[in-house]
Amino acid sequence: MGGKDLHEFAKESYLSYRNEHRPKVSRSVDRIKRLIEKEVASWGKSWFSMPPRRRLWLWRNGFMSRSDALYDVGHDREYDRYLSDYQRNRAAYINGRRSVALDDKVVFHWMMEPFDEHRVDTYGLILDGRFHDLNALRRAADGVGELRYAGDDGSGASLRGTEDAAEWVLRRLRSQGSLVLKPAGGSGGQNVMFCSYEDGSYFVGDEERSAADLESTVAELDEYLVTETIEQAAYADELFPGSVNTLRVLTMFDPVEDEPFVAIAVQRIGTSRSAPVDNFSGGGLTAEVDRETGRLSAGATYPYSGSVEWHETHPDTATPIEGTEVTGWPEVREGLLDMAGAFSHTPYIGWDVVVTGDGEFAIIEANNCSDVDLLQIHRPLLDDARVRRFYAHHDVI
């Protein structure tokens, strides 16, 4: 190979490598940028106030300032029992290219096809004010005749087209009573719309809306999924009826034992501060689920006061939290492990689960890079030798 040929080969190899890894580098920069933005935003919060020397110590060991209030992070070696904020950021790459299946709720909906009984019924996707039917392929596969959108009079547009999203949503609300509209790529329960229709009136949450106002709102939506509403099991509704209270179950696929396992599970519980969602950082509670029995620990709140507050009973409903059992937990756990085993190619998944009955559950979504604050507030993840081995295997720690 001549000098010129060698130069061209090296150039092409470099460009190929750069193009292949550019998305990962770009995502890394974006994630680090978000970490910095979160850190800077916390400086204005009185509950995260601390001496500069302490803040520098946290940074040097991979933690954001808020972790000082969330975890028992001392100046000794206690800190390395916790997955740091920097390490949690590195965990985003465990699933590699399969991460897109979890980051994109539409792709995840299709990925869950083999477990249809545990899927939330997802009707379609709103893109720039147009409704795109996600169930068309299934109906075609079922051999349904000429497929058309069903209007109030049984007519509708051809399936080969789309439909005005506002018209579809309002029509479906009148026939079904309730819908959930949520960002297709969002997280943390942000910008979720709980829409309903009752006695001739439309509502978003508890706020009554005119038909024209709701149509205008829906017409402006982009990248929104339209799904059914889920009725949670009695135990969850008794904890707090003002939100759908979900489990976050973190599963890992053990490369040594060649099997999935539950690393940790928590019950998220909404409050008057977080409603209509159960988001921990938005004011909700997190209680650890005993992996064997399904019993809940006391619930913890985000450290807005400067320290974590623990609640044996719910601060709004007075319902006992500690000792409450997740209905049918063994069946829920085993069902999730079946899914995690089927998705062994995607070894790191944070499942958001609604228990709907005794051993029955629905998957709201799955997370490629689960937040760990609502998990490690109960115990350090790296105290578990199997969890530590998993993260080490994937070069996270």
Image (tube, rainbow, N blue to C red):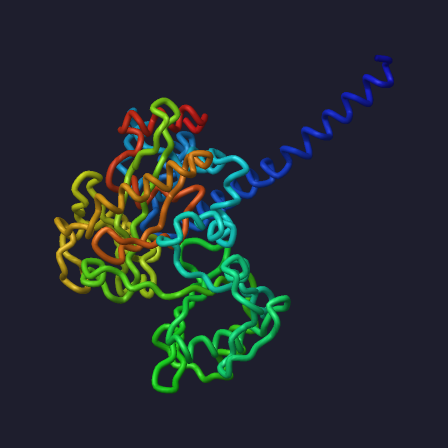
Question: Residue 366 location, x and y as percent?
Answer: 41, 48
**Pick the front one: 261 or 2:** 261
Asked if residue 135 can be seen in this view, the reply is no
Q: Residue at x 34, y 24 (%)?
A: 257
**Pick the front one: 181 or 44:** 181
Relative vertical location of residue 261 with respect to residue 149 in this rendering, above or below: above
Relative vertical location of residue 213 with respect to residue 231 in this rendering, above or below: below
State the image quarter where residue 182 is shown: bottom left
Question: Residue 191 location, x and y as percent?
Answer: 45, 63
Q: Residue at x 38, y 79 (%)?
A: 197
Please identify the quadrant where the N terminus is shown.
top right
Please identify the quadrant where the C terminus is shown.
top left
Q: Is residue 346 left or right of residue 160?
A: left
Q: Is residue 204 left or right of residue 287?
A: right
Q: Residue at x 50, y 45 (%)?
A: 101
Q: Residue at x 34, y 56 (%)?
A: 279
Question: Residue 167 location, x and y as percent?
Answer: 53, 78
Judged from this view, the residue extending furthest toward the bottom is: 200
Asked if residue 348 can be seen in this view, the reply is yes
Question: Residue 325 location, x and y as percent?
Answer: 16, 50
Relative vertical location of residue 64 with respect to residue 142 in this rendering, above or below: above
Q: Is residue 203 left or right of residue 32?
A: left
Q: Is residue 144 left or right of residue 337?
A: right
State the image quarter where residue 378 is shown: top left
* Number of dots carrying numbers: 0
**Pick the front one: 377 or 18:** 18
